[in-house]
Amino acid sequence: MSKYSFKKINLIYIQSSSIGWSDDVEKLYLKKISPYVGFQTLPIKSKSLGRSESSVKCELESQSILKKIDDKSLVWVFDEAGESLTSEKLAQDLESSFLEGPQKELNLIIGGAFGLSDKLKAQAQKKISLSKLVFNHHIAKSVVLEQLYRSFKIIHSESYHNI
């Protein structure tokens, strides 16, 4: 049992569709991450609104996300305007800010096609950029899952991450 088994991480993301390979990646990393920390994914169905209603869609999706977040938990959002991190820095921040910190829950948030509302971003303690490129939610989710697993391997000094 990991010394962080009493901690919980939620990966909350907007899902517009489901495809086999993405679901397989999610199942694989749920299995890999779970020995280190309580972990779950919480997909939120994308609102069926057109591009002309992008700001409304973003606001509604962000409200749905906020309903899933406990006021006492940490919130980190993935946003193209966020901080660019190395894998080592992400692991360091995960350990120092969350695993060794007082909060028992961390919410990692991936927004929909039109991003996250300013209100939700303002509640985040950390904003992280995955890349200067923009990814759909399937790719973003896969990258976050892999980097989270990599972080735990780095934190525990286990082989996986090659420098």
Image: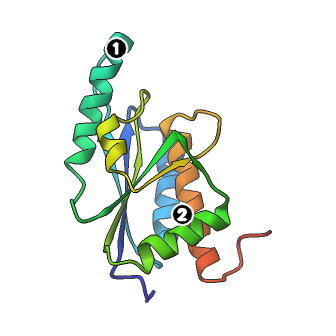
Q: Which residue is mark 1?
A: 50
Dot 2, how many residues are within 10 Å of its Cα: few (below 14), some (14-19), or many (20+)? many
SS at mark 1 in the image? loop
**Can the viewer see residue 48 in this picture?**
no
Residue 147, by quadrant, is bottom right
| Disc ID at residue 148 | 2
Q: Is residue 118 left or right of residue 2?
A: left
Residue 97 place in picture, x, y as percent: 45, 71
Give the percent coordinates (x, y) of residue 39.
38, 67
Give the residue displayed 32% in from the left and 73% down from the top: 103
What colour-coding does the image apply? rainbow
The N terminus - image quarter: bottom left
Amino acid tagged 2 = Leu
- Is residue 38 something that shows in the picture? yes
Q: Residues within 10 Å of mark 1 (few under 14, many from 20)?
A: few
- Lower position in the chain sequence, tag 1 or tag 2: 1
Q: Position of residue 112 (x, y in %)?
A: 40, 33
Horizontal and vertical percent position of residue 34: 44, 73
- The quadrant of the rendering that contains the C terminus is bottom right
Instruction: Work out whether residue 69 or residue 30 is closer to the camera in this orientation and state it.
Output: 69
Give me the C-alpha separation between circle 1 and circle 2. 33 Å
Residue furthest to the top in view is: 52
Q: Image point 43% across, 88% down: which residue? A: 3
